[in-house]
Amino acid sequence: MDTMFSNKVNFLKALAIMLVVSGHLEFSLIPMFPPYSFQLALFFFISGILFKDKYLLEFKTYFIKRVKSLLAPYFLYAAAYLGITFLFLKLTGKFWAMPITLKNELLMPFLTGHQIDLISPMWFVPQLFISLMTFFVFIKLIKSKYFALIVSFTLALFAIYLSKYSENLYILLLLRTLFSLFFLYLGYFYKNFIQGKHNILTINWILPIIALQSLLWLTNKDFTPMDGIGLSYILVWGQFDDWIVPIITSITGIWISLFLVDVFYDFIKDNSFLKAVGQNTYHIMANHLLVFNILTYFALFIKGIPFDIKNAADIYWFYFPVKTTYFYFVIGMIITTYFGVFLKNIKAKLARTAN
């Protein structure tokens, strides 16, 4: 992977995590793409880009590598947030987590990822681990690039069909895995067979992409809560409103993201903050809800409003969204990004000391 492409992928990661954080504040960074309409597919796509063929030589090595990079920090965060949840209990009177059992702490991360409310956005991490292990086997079994594309697309359609049975948590895990497989392979396909060979990010493509998305917008049911989720789909719970729209809007959203990074690259390539955002997506995903909740409880305390108003809602409820949404977003991005930088610096110092 050449340096420029690697840098663009890092900015793509930055855009993806900003889409996740903004989605949790219920606004969209990109017009015509409501929250939850493609950002998780974009993360799987990026993971497919980052998959290297050398990994195929040894499954054990790849498995250990992914355990260290994904699962180990996940369970460290889970342990830390269990302590933070007890602290919140003392301060607010509510325990923002499921009851503490071996099943909830060790199995539920792979089934729902919502055993601890404050790290519920991190459900994606154990799912990514399972999806990558499945992807490894998929790549080993299917050698033909076009056949693999067709099979993975078909499995994504089947995953949407399975959503009618998503109350079963094991079927839910299966459908998320099958749906993600297509976008993992799409990222792998893009890096290996399109990028550097065929330029699909030209201005000539933007009109048909926007035209297609505008047609999809006609199906959008996001305008009022009773209309359903429309272009958005809730992958964590396997909720889809249509059998094909989620796949199409994910593809158009991925293309728009690639296009935006490509167009603005020369303007942002030296921006240290955006670089840091792309390099710390894990820590941003892990910690932004904590920052939002601290801001919310602080606002309630300052205004003299009882904490019960927050405790009666869900973990995503925040104070006075009409005026504070973008403040939450900016503060959340800054704090979580530089917290990630801080943790990496500590890790580097410990590594130097050990050596």
Image: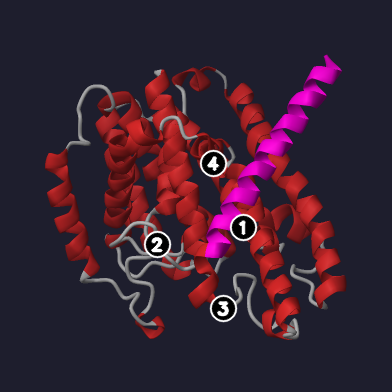
Q: Residues within 10 Å of mark 4 (few under 14, many from 20)?
A: many
Q: Nearer the viewer, mark 2 or mark 1?
A: 2
**Residue 176 coordinates in the image, percent (x, y):** 48, 54
Residue type at mark 3 is Phe
| Snapshot quadrant of residue 83 | bottom right
Majority secondary structure of the magenta segment?
helix
Q: Nearer the viewer, mark 1 or mark 3?
A: 3
* Mark 3 / mark 2, whichever is N-terminal: 2
Q: Which residues are magenta?
A: 327-355
| Snapshot quadrant of residue 276 | top right
Tag 1 residue: 111
The span from disc 3 to disc 2 (Cα, nearest Å) is 18 Å
* Mark 4 / mark 1, whichever is N-terminal: 1
* Mark 3 / mark 4, whichever is N-terminal: 4
* Mark 2 / mark 4, whichever is N-terminal: 2
SS for dot 4? helix
**Residue 145 coordinates in the image, percent (x, y):** 29, 29
In percent of the image, x 75 and y 81: which residue is there? 307
In this orientation, which residue lies closer to the viewer: 36 or 7? 7
Tag 2 residue: 28
| Snapshot quadrant of residue 70 | top right
Q: Which mark is residue 277?
A: 4
Residue type at mark 2 is Ser
Residue type at mark 1 is Leu
Tag 3 residue: 320
Left or right: where does residue 309 sit relative to residue 318?
A: right
Q: Nearer the viewer, mark 3 or mark 2?
A: 3
